[in-house]
Amino acid sequence: MDEMMQECRKRCQETAKSIDQTTKMIDEAEQSNDPARVQTALGQARKTLAEIKNHMDMCMNMLDMMEKMHGKGRKKQ
């Protein structure tokens, strides 16, 4: 379980770094007033968001498995 938590923490750190890089890229593209650069930044942002979503799904699955191992089901809202 410690290994799963470390993996989740690592993914969260990577995701935070990716968000920061993408935000910087978008800001620079906007300031450039270059439509092609803005378009490229938006395409990269979409790719980054898809990767983040994938990482979140994997972490949620790991959390679900940990809860099941401890006999606790995730509460539905």
Image (cartoon, helix red, strand yellow):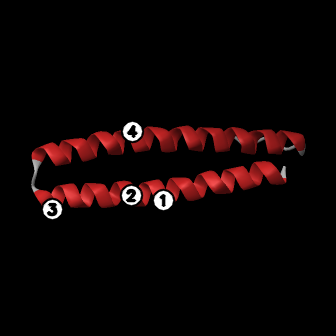
Contact, mark 3 vs mark 4 (Cβ under 8 Å):
no
Please tell me which residue lies in front, 67 or 9. Answer: 9
Q: Residues within 10 Å of mark 4 (few under 14, many from 20)?
A: few
Mark 4 — residue?
47
Q: Earlier in the sequence, mark 3 or mark 4?
A: 3
Quadrant in the rendering for residue 64: top right
Q: Earlier in the sequence, mark 3 or mark 1?
A: 1
The Cα–Cα distance between marks 2 and 4, rounded to whole angstroms, is 13 Å
Which amino acid, mark 1?
Answer: Lys
Q: Residue at x 48, y 40 (%)?
A: 51
Contact, mark 3 vs mark 1 (Cβ under 8 Å):
no
Q: Is residue 17 above or below residue 58?
A: below
The Cα–Cα distance between marks 2 and 1, rounded to whole angstroms, is 6 Å
Is residue 39 shown left or right of residue 19?
A: left
Q: Residues within 10 Å of mark 2 (few under 14, many from 20)?
A: some
Contact, mark 2 vs mark 3 (Cβ under 8 Å):
no
Q: Residue at x 41, y 61 (%)?
A: 20
Q: Residue 42's spot in the image, x, y percent?
A: 27, 44
Q: Residues within 10 Å of mark 1 (few under 14, many from 20)?
A: few
Q: Secondary structure at mark 3?
A: helix
Mark 1 — residue?
17
Q: Quadrant of the C terminus?
A: top right
Per the rendering, the mark at residue 36 is none
Is residue 55 shown left or right of residue 72?
A: left
Which amino acid, mark 3?
Answer: Gln
Mark 3 — residue?
31
Which amino acid, mark 4?
Answer: Lys
Per the rendering, the mark at residue 21 is 2
Contact, mark 2 vs mark 4 (Cβ under 8 Å):
no
Q: Secondary structure at mark 4?
A: helix
